[in-house]
Image (tube, rainbow, N blue to C red):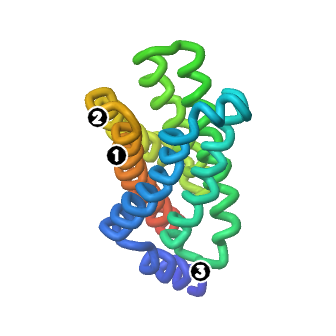
Amino acid sequence: MDNAGNRSADFAAVPSLGRSLLTGSLGFCFVSLCVFVTVAFAERWMYKHLGLFGAYLAWTVLFILLGGGVLAPLVVRRWQTPRFYLLFAAAFFAYAAGWVGAYFVLRGVAGEWIGSLAGSLLMGLVLAAGFGVARSALNLSAMLFVANSLGYFLGSAVNDSIGGKAGMLLWGLMYGLCLGAGLGAVLHFAQARGARKG
């Protein structure tokens, strides 16, 4: 009875899909803008002083540190926030490795699409495993792929059209809104399914 009661309480505590989408999109939009500000205003400096690998690593770390903070309120058990930070760090690092690896091997639009797919698959797999819903990995990865691709390619088109620092910041805004919504949805469904399963 206690386990059943705990599962019921956990399921009831899972933030609604609407709240998860809103918190994820707005919170991660802020995170993305913080990162894209450094791209818009300090990209050349970062490449010169950190190198290509160092710059991408710095941006990844920024996404992890800030992103974990804005997404943590969507985790049911607040005491698990440190664990969630570690999980999100592993998931986003896998995403970045898949994306950057595919892009630098293939280049161009093909590299961007394959990078989006590879990164989303890896992130979805890590999050699904972390929340104990491995069978949902493909569904979660698909959500991330759609959200990530929408934000990245719409933002890229806006940046190509407007250009300059404004275009780069708008790219960051659109990328953050879309990927954040995808992350919010993934956290909602992963926890809801985990609570039913547990």
The mark that comes first in sequence, 3 or 2, is 3
Q: Is residue 90 above or below residue 157?
A: below
- Asked whether, in this view, residue 144 is left or right of residue 132, the answer is left
The mark that comes first in sequence, 3 or 1, is 3
Residue 3, numbered circle: 3
Q: CA distance from mark 3 to mark 1?
A: 42 Å
Residue 134, numbered circle: none
- Residue found 30% across the figure and 67% down from its top: 18
Q: Nearer the viewer, residue 163 or 30?
A: 163
Q: In the rendered image, which quarter is residue 28 located in?
A: bottom left
Tell me if residue 153 can be seen.
no
Kind of element beneath mark 1 = helix
- Asked whether, in this view, residue 86 is left or right of residue 166, the answer is right
Kind of element beneath mark 3 = helix
The mark that comes first in sequence, 1 or 2, is 2
Q: Amino acid at mark 1?
A: Met
**Label 1: which residue?**
174
- Residue found 66% across the figure and 78% down from its top: 79
Q: For label 3, count other residues whose C-alpha is less than 10 Å away and answer few (under 14), some (14-19) or many (20+).
A: few
**Label 2: which residue?**
158
Q: Which quarter of the figure is the N terminus placed in?
A: bottom right
Of marks 3 and 2, the one in the foreground = 2
Residue 80 point in image, percent of width and height: 65, 72
Q: For label 1, count other residues whose C-alpha is less than 10 Å away and answer few (under 14), some (14-19) or many (20+).
A: many
Q: In the rendered image, which quarter is residue 93 located in?
A: top right
Q: Amino acid at mark 2?
A: Val
Q: In the rendered image, which quarter is residue 122 located in?
A: top right
Q: Which quarter of the figure is the C terminus placed in?
A: bottom right
